Amino acid sequence: MRQLDASPKLVERVHAAVLAEIAAGNLEPGERIIQEQIANKLGVSRQPVQQALLLLRNQRVLTDAPGRGLLVAALNLAYVRNMYDMRAVIEGLAFRQAALVNAGRAAVEGPAYIQAGQLAVTNGSVPGMIAADMAFHEFIYELSENPLIPPAMDSHWIQAQRVMGEVFKRDDQPRNIWDQHAVLLECVIAGDGDKAERLAREHILQAADFMLARLDS
């Protein structure tokens, strides 16, 4: 972990840094979280670390340790399945609306997200692949112009980062989903809301099947 400069959003930055370490496999399920170590590595006081850790506990990323303290929680496969089922519906809505209201902007800005994702896969960087995937979907949420979608997806992405990180680090050649993303983007650019919604739902449910099979193996 690199040290962080103080900022008004320090708790959020500590939260993101700890979650990234867990997603990358640097903090394993069952591993005890030590506030002082995290504060020292990030170059911050214990207060923002404590607040960030409590937030992660509320989000099921961490769990109470016997006695006192916190541990990295194990992934609950039933919870993951339910999360992806809900996400499929929301993603379908986001892609439909993006196609209906922002096809032009998708054509101009969208290809760069596809290129970034393909490059991350080529480089084999787990954090890079996760970041590229999140950036593409967040771009679609923005194009949908539905302000309720991004906050509704926040909790899903907290767990999705863990799922992707756990699966990606197991595979020598991680599954490349960017061809599917490219097809989804083409539907948005074409303004085909029906097809964009259908393929987005299929994309998420197929991802769920793949991820759960790998986690359960």
Image (cartoon, rainbow, N blue to C red):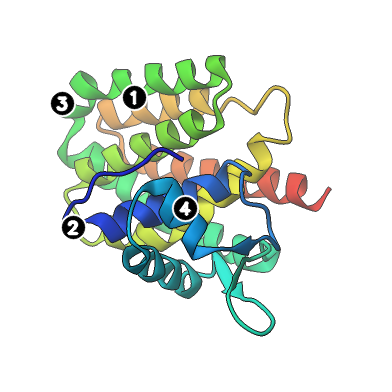
The circle on residue 147 is: 2
- How far separated are the C-alphas under marks 4 and 3? 37 Å
In this rendering, the label closer to the viewer, 1 or 3: 1
Q: Are marks 4 and 3 in contact (CB under 8 Å)?
A: no
In this rendering, the label closer to the viewer, 4 or 3: 4
Question: Mark 1 or mark 4, which has the lower sequence index?
Answer: 4
Residue at the disc numbered 3: 104
Left or right of residue 97: residue 58: right
Which is nearer the eye, 193 or 203?
A: 203
Badge 1 crowding class, 10 Å Cα cut-off, few under 14, some 14 to 19, many 20 or more, is many
Q: Amino acid at mark 2?
A: Pro
Q: Quadrant of residue 109?
A: top left
Badge 2 crowding class, 10 Å Cα cut-off, few under 14, some 14 to 19, many 20 or more, is few
Disc 4 element: helix
- How far separated are the C-alphas under marks 1 and 3? 15 Å
Q: Amino acid at mark 3?
A: Gly
- How far separated are the C-alphas under marks 1 and 2? 21 Å
The circle on residue 113 is: 1
The circle on residue 77 is: none
